[in-house]
Image (spheres, helix red, strand yellow):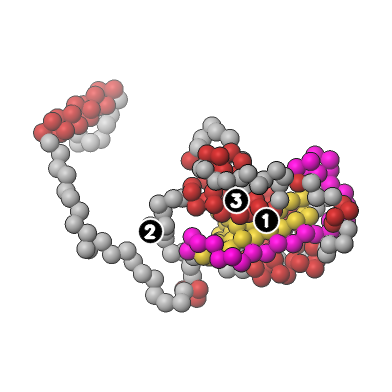
């Protein structure tokens, strides 16, 4: 399974109000292993960053002045993500900006190039409800070293996100479902074979059964006799 971890930096928070992309980074992972391939471009947004955004990423207009326009890197970006699952933290934000940039060029939306999109922020909220789930908090919680992250940077953040994702889904690598299309497979899909395992069977003891029946009786009483299992 090919995944692309994607992050952007922008001039501000609102693509629909004229804010633009200034940095794009993608990191490739295949079968839960980083391949070393990445896509990383700075982009001249033809406008200044808001002060709040500049404090976050530190990428100045002077630095971006000689960088290419988005139009010059758009096709490279689409080619890099094509056929992969996109993994993004707060996907609506990054996709909203990238699709706005592509719309200006009358090019197809980025999600049209990918198999699917996985939002790790949504995943983190399910796993850690009522906790902070930004990238810094997840790195600390999942023991991912972020000591080099003094400012936000798209490439570093994409690499950190890949490590966070691996730790969030630890133990799933042997149970991952193959979601590639038949055209993407180089050979037949392999099913897990458990026939060689000698799995123990643990039978309930009479005490276990009695305790179970007692709990069921209490639930039936609490529901006013409306439970379905006695029938």
Residue 155 against residue 231 in the figure, above or below: below
Q: Please name the residue shown 67% across and 56% down the image.
A: 155
- Identify residue for label 2: 174
Q: Is 154 within the magenta?
A: no
**In the rendered view, does 155 fall on the left or right side of 29?**
right
Q: Residue at x 15, y 39 (%)?
A: 204
Residue 45 seen from this side = yes
Residue extent of the magenta highlight: 31-56
As drawn, is 202 to the left or to the right of 46?
left
In this rendered view, identify the residue nearer to me: 144 or 4.
Answer: 144
Q: Mark 1: which secondary structure?
A: helix
* Residue position marked by numbered label 1 in the rendering: 155
The question of residue 55 being in magenta is answered with yes
Q: Is residue 8 left or right of residue 12?
A: left
Which label number is shown at residue 160?
Answer: 3
Query: Earlier along the polypeptide chain: callout 3 or callout 1?
Result: 1
Of badges 2 and 1, the one in the foreground is: 1
Q: Residue placed at 84% from the left, 50% from the top?
A: 60
Badge 3 crowding class, 10 Å Cα cut-off, few under 14, some 14 to 19, many 20 or more, is many
């Amino acid at each position: 399974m090919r995944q692309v971890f994607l992050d952007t930096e922008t001039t501000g928070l609102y693509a629909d109000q004229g804010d633009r992309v200034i940095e794009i980074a993608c990191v490739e992972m295949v079968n839960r292993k980083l391949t070393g391939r990445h896509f990383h471009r700075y982009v001249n947004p033809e406008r200044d960053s808001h002060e709040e955004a500049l404090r976050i990423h530190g990428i100045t207009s002077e630095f971006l002045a000689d960088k290419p326009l988005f139009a010059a890197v758009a096709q490279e970006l689409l080619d890099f993500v094509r056929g992969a699952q996109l993994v993004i933290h707060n996907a609506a934000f990054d996709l909203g900006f990238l699709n706005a940039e592509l719309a200006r060029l009358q090019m197809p939306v980025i999600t049209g190039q990918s198999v699917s999109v996985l939002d790790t922020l949504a995943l983190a909220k399910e796993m850690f409800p009522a906790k902070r789930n930004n990238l810094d908090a997840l790195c600390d919680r999942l023991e991912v070293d972020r000591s080099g992250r003094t400012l936000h940077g798209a490439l570093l953040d994409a690499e950190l996100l890949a490590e966070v994702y691996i730790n969030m889904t630890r133990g799933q690598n042997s149970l991952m479902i193959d979601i590639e299309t038949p055209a993407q497979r180089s050979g037949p899909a392999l099913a897990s074979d458990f026939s060689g395992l000698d799995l123990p069977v643990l039978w309930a003891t009479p005490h276990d059964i009695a305790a179970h029946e007692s709990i069921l009786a209490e639930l039936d009483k609490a529901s006013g006799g409306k439970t379905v299992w006695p029938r």
